[in-house]
Image: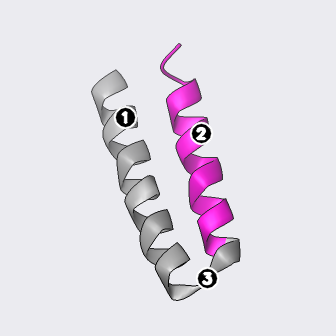
Amino acid sequence: MARSYLRQAMERVRHAEEALTNGNYPYVVRQCQEAVELTSRLH
């Protein structure tokens, strides 16, 4: 399950990077928040 959460978090970061390139800052924040939430489940 931890690997799944980590994989999902990494996908959110990838999406955030793409959104940052496109100037879609609200989506960057959203994706980063989701990545943080997913990684917090690893503890």
Name the secondary structure under disc 2.
helix
Give the CA distance from mark 3 to mark 2: 19 Å
Q: Position of residue 25 (x, y in %)?
A: 67, 76
- Nearer the observer, 42 or 13: 13
Name the secondary structure under disc 3.
loop
User: Is 27 left or right of 6, judged from the image as shown?
Assistant: right
Write down the residue under mark 2. Answer: 36
User: Residue type at mark 2?
Assistant: Val
- Residue 1 visible at all: no
- Segment tinted magenta in the rendering: 27-43
Q: Position of residue 33 (x, y in %)?
A: 65, 50
Identify the residue at the far top of this view: 43
User: Is 17 left or right of 29, judged from the image as shown?
Assistant: left
User: Residue type at mark 1?
Assistant: Leu
Dot 3 or dot 2, earlier in sequence: 3
- Residue 13 visible at all: yes
User: Residue type at mark 3?
Assistant: Asn
Q: Which mark is residue 24?
A: 3
Give the CA distance from mark 1 to mark 2: 10 Å
Dot 1 or dot 2, earlier in sequence: 1
Q: Residues within 10 Å of mark 3 (few under 14, many from 20)?
A: few
Is residue 39 shown in magenta?
Answer: yes
- Nearer the observer, 31 or 1: 31
Mark in front: 1 vs 3: 3
- Nearer the observer, 40 or 24: 24
Mark in front: 3 vs 2: 3
Q: Which mark is residue 6?
A: 1
Q: Residue at x 48, y 20 (%)?
A: 42
Report if the CB atoms under discs 1 and 3 are less than 8 Å apart. Answer: no
